[in-house]
Amino acid sequence: MYEGILTLLVSSILALILFVLTLWYQNRSKAREKVIETEIIQTELISPEISGLIPVYTNIKRSRVSISSGYKYIINAKNIGLGEIEKPEFDISFDTNANIHKVKVDSKYLTPDKIELPSGIQRPNYCRVIPQYMNKGHTLTIAVTTINNEIKNCNIDVRGAGILHRKKTFNPTWIVVAIIFFITLIALLNRFLVI
């Protein structure tokens, strides 16, 4: 009987140590001071009623363009590092046939006058967004409407001194640790109750 309790206690302590090490590793990987994580949180086909000929205001000139496709991309960017990032540059591009129709930037931390959208860029499938700063935990939402995309992909690059850019991915570490802990606990309790 004491052997079952001892095994349960040792297994629980090992699972707790594994959990703490996982927390430490995740925080250590975020310990860089300048880390921006981006994610495309919504991509939708624009309704067909806008198809046909409409005036399009590109970065180059005002023209009439026939629309074959249209997409709206909502890009969420977050400073997950430990410090403030000054003037990060978000470069957003699409395939060569795409035209950017509209760019809108929202942030609950920055007023519109603190976000720069350079207009001298001579590529209709590319835009740049430059906020003056992003403090730790601050988010920025960039909505981009495009037309005539051949490929639905959106390329995002974040540039600046010492900035690490990473795309948000699902991290199953917490789920795996919790499953291992509960399987171990159930197995030990089952063994303990059988004895």
Image: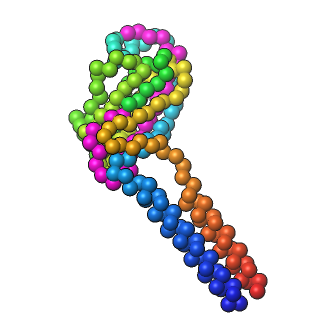
Residue 100 or residue 185, whichever sits in front: 185
Q: Is residue 78 left or right of residue 47?
A: left
- Prevailing SS of the magenta stretch: strand
Residue 61 or residue 121, whichever sits in front: 121
Q: Could you tell me which residue is drawn at 39 percent across and 12 percent down?
A: 55
> Is residue 31 covered in magenta?
no
Q: Quadrant of the C terminus?
A: bottom right
Q: Is residue 179 above or below residue 193?
A: above
Q: Quadrant of residue 18?
A: bottom right
Q: Could you tell me which residue is drawn at 48 percent across and 16 percent down?
A: 97
Q: Residue farthest to the left?
A: 113
Q: Is residue 59 left or right of residue 112?
A: right
Is residue 102 at least partly visible in the picture? yes
Q: Residue 170 placed where, x, y %?
A: 54, 49
Range of the magenta residues?
63-90
Residue 105 or residue 179, whichever sits in front: 179
Q: Is residue 24 above or below residue 48?
A: below
Q: Could you tell me which residue is drawn at 61 percent across and 80 percent down?
A: 10
Is residue 48 at least partly visible in the picture? no
